[in-house]
């Protein structure tokens, strides 16, 4: 499955990834959010990521990602829409990963395919 994998890490080098536990940002979810949010920049740090590049998030950016997750959860809450259910599942897992990184004073790296 194509998309972006998020890991907790010490640095940008892939050998510093702390655990194999990760969260996958599926390209279909990203595409849906990009389409829905095309006139807004409120979730851009997350949804505008390059699927083929890596990005290391600072502590400040991870805190912003947590806020973005909360915003997405507030907007996409239709329990009768399968895509919104998938978005919520991804967002809850990703928020948990971000909070874990903050708690451990570590970083998040997005690894593109």
Image: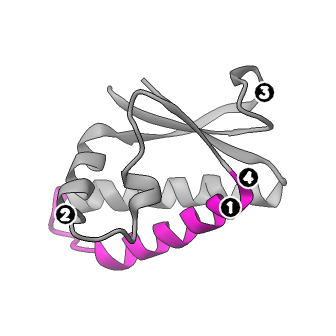
* Badge number at residue 43: none
How crowded is the residue under tag 1: few (<14 C-alpha within 10 Å), some, or many (20+)? some
Q: Please name the residue that numbered disc 2 is placed on.
A: 36
Disc nearer the start of the sequence (3/4): 3
In the image, 52 versus 81, the foreground residue is 52
Q: In this view, does 71 lie to the left or right of 8?
A: left
Local SS, label 1 = helix
* Badge number at residue 101: 4
Disc nearer the start of the sequence (4/2): 2
Q: Is residue 87 left or right of residue 25?
A: left
Disc nearer the start of the sequence (2/1): 2
Q: Specify the color scheme.
A: one colour
Marks 3/1: CA–CA distance: 19 Å
Residue 15 in picture, x, y percent from top left: 75, 20
Residue 3 in picture, x, y percent from top left: 37, 33
Q: Please name the residue that numbered disc 3 is placed on.
A: 16
Residue found at x 51% / y 54%: 93
Whether 16 is among the magenta residues is: no
Nearer the camera: disc 2 or disc 1: 2
How would you classify the magenta stretch by its main secondary structure?
helix
In the image, 39 versus 31, the foreground residue is 39
Whether residue 40 is visible to the viewer of this picture, yes or no, is yes
Q: What stretch is highlighted in magenta?
A: 58-82
């Amino acid at each position: 499955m194509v998309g972006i994998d998020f890991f907790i890490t010490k640095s940008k080098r892939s050998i510093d990834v702390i655990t194999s536990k990760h969260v996958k940002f599926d390209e279909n979810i990203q595409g849906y959010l990009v389409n829905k949010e095309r006139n807004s920049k409120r979730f851009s740090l997350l949804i505008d990521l390059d699927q083929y590049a890596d990005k290391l998030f600072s502590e400040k950016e991870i805190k912003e990602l947590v806020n973005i997750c909360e915003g997405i959860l507030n907007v996409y809450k239709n329990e009768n829409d399968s895509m919104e259910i998938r978005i919520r599942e991804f967002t809850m897992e990703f928020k948990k990963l971000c909070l874990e990184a903050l708690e451990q004073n570590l970083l998040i790296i997005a690894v593109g395919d």
